[in-house]
């Protein structure tokens, strides 16, 4: 006990206070988001709130990145709409359980490591698109439903008051760190603006106008869906899409938050955490979830760096539902919108605008494509499209790098020095380098500065060898590296290993008599 007391210092209490207050700030911002996403998915608000609590606390405890916030998100909600409308909420719960199982499998097979294949322009497009999505999602708070259920803008007077309160919240968030860092700036903005509105009974929309958040503890519930092949065929496509979107958004948020804090988390661990969280959520009446970029940014900007902030946010959210709903429902939406607008400003990669004239056009195109698709469609499709376009741009760039320099050696033989990778994109350029008709009787191709990459490259070499064979000419391939040698052996069974292969390199000669490749020292 003395050892424990010895390690408790004033700085420890300061850190704990910062983490808990950051969690409180996040919890306040989670409420309208969870309620709104519930409406999008077509379920009761408590279904979204329970998901935010359960997913949030489990990922906070065992997630791959301390300080990252997870909960119900719009990216998942839009996929759930048709499932809920066509089959009912019980099918949604069953889908979330299966979604969690798929994410656990992704962690087991370490599929999270493939997030490394996402290029930096895709990341820039991701954060920019997500910032725009967050901004657009807040505009609905300035609208009301008429008697026919059609949303329209508020009257000018109420709209003006809302805008003033939003600007006041944003100003407080900007000014507070210049005065004190003892309290999270977003929390100060929410409390001051909410206190002003409540004290003077200003008539503006409150959290309670969205829906009542009063409820009890989530209870265990097995989805009432029969385990049949037909039902599995219904829920599996949704579960697969939700699992993919959830992991992509979570892993990209993992990298983004890691870049900000300088502490990169574990991708596989995050897959496990998201999977376990969603599986549990499905059995406790929640709509599932994933990492939330907006709330994660609020947490980080408020000083949340450890698991305490995420745990606190979830516990505060449960407290709001069980005992504090009457107080939370009084908070003006304008204060929470102001917080989210500051998140938008902090999330958008403003430097991406200034670097547009300095970076390759392909990178600019990728960044814009990802941004637009994120806004117009969804994140998963945007990231996949961005990776595909980046890969094609990379392939095209490397296809133009194939070069050849022809010389005649002292024996009067043509020798071609190849530079650049030989793969599916460069095989045409490779074939154009040679003059089969006019070349000497013996032709040598030197791959010292090249590399055979794929089956297309092997086929290009074989086709070239056949052309020389028809002309009764001998083709020799030299300086093939060990990995190229391995590729040739695997792909075409054209190379036969021998005990006297040199250790420093491998040459492969083509025999016009046998029509095959063989090894030879040189």
Image (tube, rainbow, N blue to C red):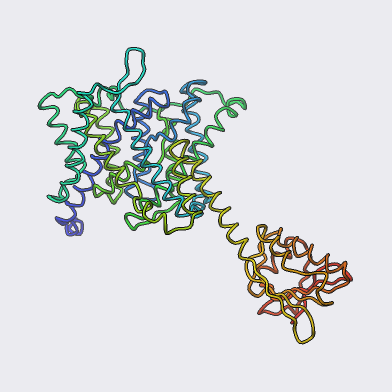
- Which quarter of the rendering shows the C terminus? bottom right
Q: Is residue 485 above or below residue 157?
A: below
Residue furthest left as drawn: 199
What is the quadrant of residue 132 in the picture?
Answer: top left
Query: Where residue 518 appears, x then y in whole percent?
Result: 80, 72
What is the quadrant of residue 264 in the picture?
Answer: bottom left
- Left or right position of 416 against 240: right
Query: Where residue 473 appears, x then y in whole percent?
Result: 85, 73
Residue furthest bottom as drawn: 410
- Which quarter of the rendering shows the N terminus? bottom left
- Left or right position of 251 against 211: right
How many marks overall?
A: 0
Residue drawn at x 18%, y 47% is 17
Query: Where residue 21 appears, x then y in whole percent?
Result: 21, 43
- Left or right position of 300 against 190: right
Query: Where residue 54 appears, x then y in whole percent?
Result: 36, 36
Residue drawn at x 30%, y 35% is 30
Q: Is residue 163 above or below residue 374?
A: above
Question: Viewer-proximal residue, 454 or 465?
Answer: 465
Q: Is residue 454 above or below residue 98?
A: below
């Amino acid at each position: 006990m003395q050892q424990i007391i010895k390690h408790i210092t004033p700085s420890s209490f300061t850190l704990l206070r910062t983490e808990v207050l950051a969690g409180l700030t996040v919890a306040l911002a989670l409420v309208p988001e969870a309620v709104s996403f519930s409406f999008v998915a077509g379920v009761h608000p408590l279904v979204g709130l329970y998901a935010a609590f359960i997913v949030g606390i489990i990922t906070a405890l065992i997630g791959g990145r301390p300080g990252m916030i997870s909960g119900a998100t719009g990216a998942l909600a839009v996929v759930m709409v048709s499932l809920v409308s066509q089959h009912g909420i019980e099918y949604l719960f069953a889908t979330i359980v299966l979604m969690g199982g798929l994410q656990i499998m992704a962690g087991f097979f370490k599929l999270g490591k493939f997030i490394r294949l996402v290029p930096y322009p895709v990341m820039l497009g991701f954060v920019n698109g997500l910032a725009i999505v967050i901004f657009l999602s807040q505009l609905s708070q300035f609208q009301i439903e008429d008697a026919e259920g059609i949303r329209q803008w508020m009257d000018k007077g109420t709209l003006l008051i809302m805008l003033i309160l939003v600007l006041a919240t944003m100003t407080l968030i900007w000014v507070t760190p210049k005065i004190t860092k003892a309290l999270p700036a977003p929390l100060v903005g929410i409390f001051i603006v909410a206190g002003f509105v409540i004290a003077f009974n200003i008539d503006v929309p409150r959290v309670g106008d969205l829906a009542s958040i009063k409820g009890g503890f989530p209870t265990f519930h097995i989805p009432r869906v029969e385990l049949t092949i037909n039902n599995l065929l219904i829920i599996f496509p949704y579960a697969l899409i939700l699992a993919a979107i959830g992991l992509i958004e979570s892993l990209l948020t993992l990298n983004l938050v890691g870049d900000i804090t300088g502490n990169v988390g574990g991708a596989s661990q995050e897959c496990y955490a998201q999977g376990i969280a969603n599986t549990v959520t499905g059995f406790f009446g929640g709509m599932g979830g994933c990492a939330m970029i907006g709330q994660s940014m609020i947490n980080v900007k408020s000083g949340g760096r450890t698991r305490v902030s995420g745990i606190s946010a979830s516990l505060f959210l449960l407290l709001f539902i069980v005992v504090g709903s009457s107080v939370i429902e009084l908070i003006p939406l304008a204060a929470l919108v102001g917080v989210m607008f500051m998140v938008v400003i902090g999330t958008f990669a403003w430097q991406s605008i200034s670097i547009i004239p300095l970076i390759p056009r392909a990178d600019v195109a990728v960044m814009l494509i990802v941004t637009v698709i994120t806004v117009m469609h969804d994140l998963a499709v945007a990231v996949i499209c961005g990776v595909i376009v980046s890969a094609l741009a990379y392939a095209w760039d490397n296809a133009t790098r194939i070069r050849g320099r022809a010389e005649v050696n002292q024996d009067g033989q043509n020798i071609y020095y190849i530079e650049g990778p030989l793969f599916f994109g460069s095989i045409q350029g490779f074939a154009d380098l040679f003059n089969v008709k006019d070349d000497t009787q013996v032709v040598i191709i030197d791959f010292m500065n090249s590399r055979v990459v794929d089956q297309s490259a092997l086929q290009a070499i074989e086709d070239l060898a056949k052309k020389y064979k028809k002309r009764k000419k001998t083709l020799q391939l030299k300086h093939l590296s060990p990995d190229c040698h391995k590729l040739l052996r695997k792909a075409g069974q054209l190379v036969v290993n021998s005990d006297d292969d040199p250790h420093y390199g491998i040459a492969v000669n083509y025999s016009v008599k046998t029509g095959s490749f063989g090894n030879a020292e040189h």
